[in-house]
Amino acid sequence: MTRLIVAAGGGGDAVAAAMLSSGLYGGADPAVILTYAWDRPLLGLVPGPRKVRDFIGLEQITPAVSAVPAEARAVAPADSTLPRLAAEVPHTVALLDPHHGAEGVTRQLEELVGHFEPESIDLLDVGGDILARGDEPTLKSPLADALTLAAACQVNAPIRLLVAGPGLDGEVSPDDLRPVLGPVVHTLTADDVERMGAVLAWHPSEAAAMLAATARGVRGACEVRDAGPAVALTDEGPRVHEVDLDEALNRNRLARAIMTTAALDEAEAYSREICGFSEIDHERDTAAQVGDQLPAKPDAEAVWRQLDRFEAQARDRGATHTTFRHLTEALNLHSSQHETLRRLLTDSRPEQYDAPLWRVA
């Protein structure tokens, strides 16, 4: 029997899917994790999600769906975290390609359901932006979640929508989410997270990092990238709620609008109309500003000076923790130096490493 877990927004949702498989099902049987290759942008600075043709070495599962094995590689100048993730989890990582809009995502889901006849199908979102109405001022990345939600509601199979760590993505507040959250189906524990410790040490997802940290008992206020408001790390953090799928669709205006889209560009246009922006436009702007220059090796002495200054300011703002992705941004480093910075800091000041977050001194 196979379990299918759809990572609604890609990125950290795929990491959370592996944690959930362990915590909710005991990890006895490997699952199929269907996810976007969408790193927003961190690797390769190529805007938007990756297509099938952006990879070498995929393994076809159905006509529209391919697995991403550990040996696969993204075609330069793009890159992807999925092959490395596939190498470190016991699950099959399958590529969700949204370039044919919600109709294409629906087709991929239907093919996987027909091929595997899974025992269970979970649609997982960390933070809850899959429940966004579209007008929230802190909303940053509604498109991926809206596409998977729109598709899931059109598949002729029972799909359970799960929201882990309400509010941890910093996009929709927990207060706004509570009225629509259903029962808690699982509370992630340190043991659930421990099995993913090696992945969490390098994966750039902020939401997955905060989900894991709260499961390990970390509490406080965590600053995230793009100068967003600090995210509260509370007892709600490790909880996984079930949410009624139809209620989610009724709430998500963008998902309703894009149900019949046949191209990603078409779905983007609806996002601009309903939400006032497209997250891929932001990625295009970022890629244009950074360009393709290779970053210089970080100067350790300069890093420590900037870190001390950042921590003093963060304390004044009431922050107790931050993510390494935000630190990379705050210290004016290239986004690809995220992992290098983590090693430098944790090797020198291990007492401040509240894995996988950095504790403000």
Image: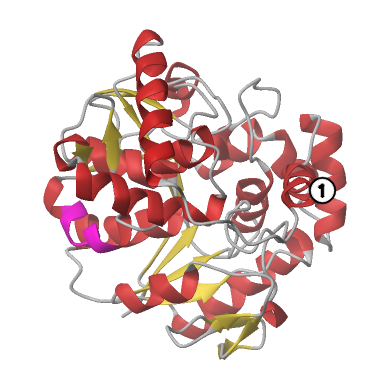
Place residue 70 in its image quadrant: bottom left
Q: Can residue 123 be seen in this view?
A: no
Residue at image coords 48%, 42%: 328
Q: Nearer the viewer, residue 305 or 16?
A: 305
Residue depicted at 84% across the width and 42% down the height: 270
Q: Give the range drawn in magenta.
A: 192-198
x, y percentage for residue 285? Answer: 79, 44
Residue 215 located within the stretch drawn in magenta: no
Front residue of 131 and 44? 44
Residue 345 percent location from the top left of the image: 29, 44
How crowded is the residue under tag 1: few (<14 C-alpha within 10 Å), some, or many (20+)?
A: many
Left or right? Give the position of 211 relative to 43.
left
Looking at the image, which is closer to me, 27 or 85? 85
- Which residue sits at x=25%, y=39%? 213
Tell me if residue 259 comes above or below residue 240 in the rendering: below
Residue 132 x %, y %: 60, 31
What's under tag 1, amino acid-wise?
Glu
Q: Which residue is drawn at 74% across and 52% down?
A: 287
> Is disc 1 placed on a helix, strand or loop?
helix
Viewport quadrant of the N terminus:
bottom left
Give the residue pinned by disc 1: 268
